[in-house]
Amino acid sequence: MSYNCASCENDSCLIKKNLNYINNLDPNITDQKHTIQCKKSRQFIMEGAPVNGLYFIYSGKVKVIKTGYNGKEQILRLSKDGEVIGHRGFGMGETYKIGATAIEDTILCNFSSSLLKEILLSEPKVTFDFMHFYANELNRSETKVKTMSQMTVREKVIDMILYIYRKFGNHDDGTIGLELSRKELADYAGTTDEQVIRILSALKKEQLIYTKAKLIKILDLSKLKKEIAEHNFFLDS
Amino acid sequence: MSYNCASCENDSCLIKKNLNYINNLDPNITDQKHTIQCKKSRQFIMEGAPVNGLYFIYSGKVKVIKTGYNGKEQILRLSKDGEVIGHRGFGMGETYKIGATAIEDTILCNFSSSLLKEILLSEPKVTFDFMHFYANELNRSETKVKTMSQMTVREKVIDMILYIYRKFGNHDDGTIGLELSRKELADYAGTTDEQVIRILSALKKEQLIYTKAKLIKILDLSKLKKEIAEHNFFLDS
DNA sequence: CGCCTATTTGAACCGGGTCAAGCATTGTGG
DNA sequence: CCACAATGCTTGACCCGGTTCAAATAGGCG
C-alpha cells in the first residue's frame, strides 16, 4: 500500500497543503518520502540520535517527550494526523532534542533532511508556512512554561483535560477518545500519577467529569474552563 | 541618528545576515523600518495588543514575559542585540501573546508585518533562517518546560545563573554584567524572590558564587554545571 | 540626613510528593 | 476455563520542600 501525497486527505499537513508549490520543483518529488508503519508504544525518535529528517503523521497519535532526571518523562505535546514531528529535522549533522512514541498504531511519512531543505530553500510559501507552524508551537510551549511554573496541580490537571479534549475530544457528547495511562497523564501535567488520580476522583465527585477506566468524559466544560480562566487573560486561540 | 541596516554590525541579526538577499527585492527596502528608542523599564510590547510587526534589538537588553495568575510574571527569555522579539509579528490581525520590556536603555528596529511578509514570501533563504530561529527557540522553550516541571528550586536557580552567564557573562573573570532584581531572577526561575535570595546565600556560603548587590560572579562553574547535569543528558548546545 | 524601596533572614503553614497497602484488571499457563 | 501472577489503579498517611507572612536590615535617592 502506498500513501502518496496527491491522494492524501490530511489537508492540514504542511506538505499536502502546499503540494502545488512543491510540485513546481518536480511533480514526483514527494515520491522520495518514506512511509513507516509504527505499532503502538514504539518509539520512533530517540533523544540524542542523529536526525534523519522530519516525520509527518499520516494517521495515528503520537506523544512528544523529553527525558529528565532519573528517567522521568515530560510529555511536551500530543500530535495527531496532519502534524509534524522533529524540530531539528532539516539541519544536517544535528541530533534530535526530543523523543517521539506512538500511542496508537501510526503511519508516518518521513522526509529526509536534504529533500526537505531542497523544498524549503526554493519555495518560500512552504517555508513561510513551516515558520508559522514553529512560531505557533513556540507560543504553545511558552504558555506551557507559565502553566508549569504557576498553576497548582489541580489546575494543571484541568488544563490537561481541556487540552486533550480540544485536540481529541468528541465535542458532541464530551468524551475524549484517547487512551492514556494515569502515568502518561501525569507526565503531561508535570506531576505524579497518584496526584492525577486524586484530582480526577475529586472532579468526578464534583460532577465535572465522568471516568470509566481510561475513558474521560466532560460533564461541565464551562466550570472547568472557569477554574483556570484567571491564568489565561491572553489565551492562545 | 539613523540606524540603517547596511552599516549595522549585528552580524547575528537575521536581517543583517541576509541583507544581500533582501536587497534583491529593492536595495532600499530596509529603509522602511522604524527605529525606536526605549528607556529602561519601558514595556514596548503588551500582551494582547494587536501586532505591529517584529522588533529586532539594535542595542540593549530585553525581557520577554507572560503574565499569569494575579499578575505574576513569568520571564520566558532574555534577549540582547541581534535578536528578534515578537513571534506572531508577521501575521495580520493577530495579537501579541507575549510582553516585552527593556531592562536597559534599548534601541529597537521595527519591521511592519506587511514589509516582513513581503520579504519572507520572496526570499526563501531568509524565511529558512527565520524558521530555523523559531525551531531553535522552540527547543529552548521545551527544555524550559521540563526544567520547570522537574527541577527543585535550587536547581532552577543554578540553571538560571548558568543561563544568564552563558548569555551575558564575562567568561574571563566569571562576572555577569546584568542588573536584574531578585524578583526578576525569581520570575525567570519560576519561584519567589525570598527563595532566590536563600539559594544565592547558600551558594555564596559554599563558595560557588560571589554576590555584591546586583552583581553575580561565578567562582566554580564546573560544580554548578555538575549539579544540574543529570537533568541534561541531551543538552541543547 | 531621612524616606522609601529592595534585600535578607526567620518562622509557620500547606501543597504536593513519597511510601505503603489494598483493589481491580488483564494476561498467561496449566 | 480457572488459578494465579503481573501490572495498573486507587486511597490513606506521612513528611519535606517551598510558599507565605512578618520583621529587621541595607541600600538608593532626593
Image (tube, coloured by chain):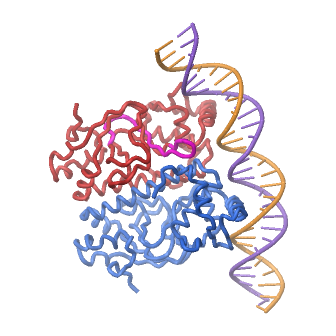
Chain colours: A blue, B red, C purple, D orange
Query: With respect to residue A207, does B69 lie above or below?
Result: above
Q: Position of residue B185 (x, y in %)?
A: 53, 37
Q: Give whichever of B174, B9 is nearer the camera.
A: B9
Tell me which corner region of the image, top left, top right, bottom left or bottom right, holds residue B119.
bottom left
Query: With respect to residue A54, does B118 lie above or below?
Result: above
Q: Position of residue B175 (x, y in %)?
A: 47, 31
Residues rendered magenta in the picture:
B56-74
**In the image, B56: left or right of B148?**
left
Q: Give whichever of C18, B224 is nearer the camera.
A: C18
Query: With respect to residue A101, does B88 lie above or below?
Result: above
Asked whether B69 falls inside the magenta stretch, the response is yes
Residue A71 visible in rendering: no
Q: Position of residue A20 (x, y in %)?
A: 26, 73
Q: Give whichever of B191, B32 is nearer the camera.
A: B32
Q: Give whichever of A145, A26 is nearer the camera.
A: A145
User: How many labels, in total?
Assistant: 0
Query: With respect to residue A215, does B189 lie above or below?
Result: above
- Point out the image quarter for the C terminus of chain A: bottom left
* Residue at left offset 38%, top offset 39%: B44
* Residue at left offset 42%, top offset 41%: B100
Q: Position of residue B85 (x, y in %)?
A: 37, 45
